[in-house]
Image (cartoon, rainbow, N blue to C red):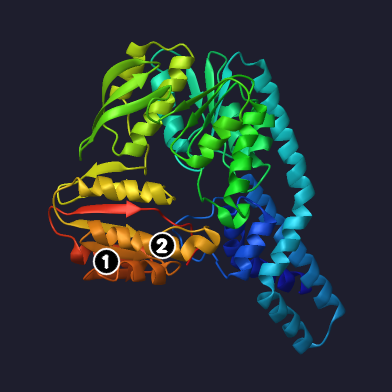
């Protein structure tokens, strides 16, 4: 009977713990980050981003169950007093988020060994491949630059790129083991980072034959602590680069890294640099510009929207050119570019047009999306929760965002409570200011206020561990 009680209670508790496991997963399986979210009570109650039952999560669930089952069984056998048993179960209920940490610690040695074996297999396969690695890091535009470079290089070469936003060691290893072929000429890898040492770890994992530094700014300041720490972390790519590095000069921090780098380097996307765009015309259907590349000029057209997209195209074109691709193929690649999903992606509808920029998470990108929105006819609606992980600058940044939205939009729907006060203060001059705490509320609200001919911009999308 004791075994049955312990089993059933453990099963109930582990089911409840899935919420905390989801936070752990959203925080890239980092215990320190998980603890910070617990302190702020930023828990993942919703289903916007469901818990993915990876093998790692399954192992954690098993460890969590086994630990709780053993403890409950021991207490039930040794303690006869009902109320004391009840008190112990109640204590577990209250302290469940903390006890979950013990499960993490129990599983940690196993996870570390699995990670080492996974990395070893990926490194072994990569070492046998003839391809050259192109690594991309920075604060903004990494995924878009990666996808653009992939499409342009594919005009002449066989190319493999890490899918979606796979930019962690395990994600990169998975791409190597599942996607990389021995016929590939280049392997394009996106390096993500939330703290110092992350880029160095990825550089050591795959090696860096060629590098790209995208603009650097105030991103993940809660974990980095300062912009200087962000820049130092991105420079870890340069320290591991075997050959040339291309720097997007649209941020002061990336230009500083360009000056610092002692090897072969190219500054692009600024006037009179190695590669840049001029005569830029951005419309609601695409962009036209003149690409200046190594003192040669080409007229280009693309379906991509926004000046930041053109900067990303310039960076990718410069790298492709330096790797030996012809100017003709580069121009064709630009003309054939497809937008990266959820990054200034236009979705045409019979009733309204939607600008999906839900994967953007920086101030400059936010302003660029508003600039794109201004090119459209019709009533303009913005749906956004603002920006997070900006440390002490978060309130003022979101207040500024609210002010910028008020200049362009007719309707603003503030999503989530995290930045509600700051965004509302910034956009206080607007007559049509609404709030939705869930996607269900957002959907119901939009059904009421949207009319034919409207344009809706979805800007940024917070993970579930932000209320």
Near mark 2 (Cα within 10 A), the count class, few <14, some 14-19 or many ≥20, is many
Q: Nearer the viewer, mark 1 or mark 2?
A: 2
Q: Which residue is mark 2?
A: 398
**Residue 210: x %, y % from top left:** 57, 22
Disc 1 to disc 2, how far (Cα)? 25 Å
- The vertical placement of 95 against 255, above or below, is below
Residue 183 in sight: yes
Q: Earlier in the sequence, mark 1 or mark 2?
A: 2
Query: In the displayed image of the protein, which residue is found farthest to the right?
Result: 78
Q: Secondary structure at mark 1?
A: helix
Within the image, what quadrant is residue 116 found in?
top right
Viewer-side residue, 79 vs 114? 114
Is residue 358 among the parts visible in the rendering? Answer: no
Observer-nearest residue: 18 or 156?
A: 156
> Which residue bears the numbered disc 1?
444
Q: Position of residue 44 (x, y in %)?
A: 53, 63
Q: Quadrant of residue 32?
A: bottom right
Disc 2 is placed on an element classified as helix
Task: Give x and y (percent) for residue 207.
Answer: 65, 25
Q: Position of residue 378 (x, y in %)?
A: 13, 53
Residue positioned 48% across, 27% down in the render:
267
Q: Which of the 4 image quarters holds residue 320?
A: top left
């Amino acid at each position: 009977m004791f075994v049955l009680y312990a089993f059933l209670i453990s099963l109930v508790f582990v089911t409840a713990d899935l919420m905390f496991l989801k936070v752990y997963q959203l925080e890239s399986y980092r215990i320190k980050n998980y603890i910070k979210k617990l302190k702020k009570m930023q828990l993942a109650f919703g289903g916007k981003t469901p818990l993915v039952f990876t093998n790692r999560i399954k192992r954690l669930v098993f460890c969590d169950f086994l630990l709780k089952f053993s403890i409950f069984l021991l207490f039930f056998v040794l303690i006869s007093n009902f109320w004391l048993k009840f008190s112990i179960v109640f204590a577990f209920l209250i302290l469940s988020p903390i006890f979950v940490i013990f499960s993490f610690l129990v599983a940690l040695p196993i996870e570390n060994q699995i990670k080492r074996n996974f990395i070893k297999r990926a490194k072994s396969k990569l070492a046998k491949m003839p391809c050259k690695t192109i690594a991309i890091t920075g604060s903004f535009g990494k995924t878009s630059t990666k996808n653009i470079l992939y499409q342009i290089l594919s005009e002449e070469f066989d190319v493999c790129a890490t899918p979606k936003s796979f930019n962690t060691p395990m994600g990169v290893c998975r791409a190597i083991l599942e996607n990389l072929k021995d016929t590939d000429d280049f392997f394009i890898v996106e390096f993500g980072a939330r703290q110092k040492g992350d880029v160095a770890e990825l550089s050591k994992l795959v090696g860096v034959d060629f590098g790209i530094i995208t603009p650097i700014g105030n991103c993940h300041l809660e974990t980095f602590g300062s912009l200087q720490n962000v820049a130092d972390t991105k420079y870890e790519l340069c320290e591991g680069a075997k050959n040339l590095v291309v720097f997007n000069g649209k941020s002061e921090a990336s230009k500083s890294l360009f000056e610092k780098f002692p090897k072969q380097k190219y500054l692009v996307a600024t006037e009179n640099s190695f590669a840049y765009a001029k005569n830029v015309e951005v419309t609601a259907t695409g962009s036209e510009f003149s690409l200046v590349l190594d003192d040669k000029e080409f007229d280009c057209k693309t379906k991509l929207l926004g000046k930041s997209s053109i900067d990303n195209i310039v960076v990718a074109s410069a790298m492709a050119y330096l790797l030996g691709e012809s100017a003709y193929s580069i121009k064709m690649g630009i003309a054939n570019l497809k937008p990266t999903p959820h990054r200034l992606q236009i979705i045409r509808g019979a009733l309204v047009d939607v600008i999906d920029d839900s994967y953007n998470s920086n101030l400059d990108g936010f302003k660029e999306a508003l600039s794109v929105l201004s090119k459209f006819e019709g009533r303009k609606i913005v749906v956004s929760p603002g920006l997070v992980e900006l440390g002490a600058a978060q309130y003022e940044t979101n207040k500024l965002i609210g002010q910028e939205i008020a200049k362009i939009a007719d309707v603003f729907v503030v999503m989530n409570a995290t930045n509600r006060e700051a965004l509302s203060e910034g956009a206080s001059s607007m007559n049509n200011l609404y709030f939705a705490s869930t996607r269900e509320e957002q959907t119901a609200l939009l059904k009421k206020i949207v009319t034919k001919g409207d344009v809706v911009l979805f800007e940024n999308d917070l993970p579930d561990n932000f209320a």
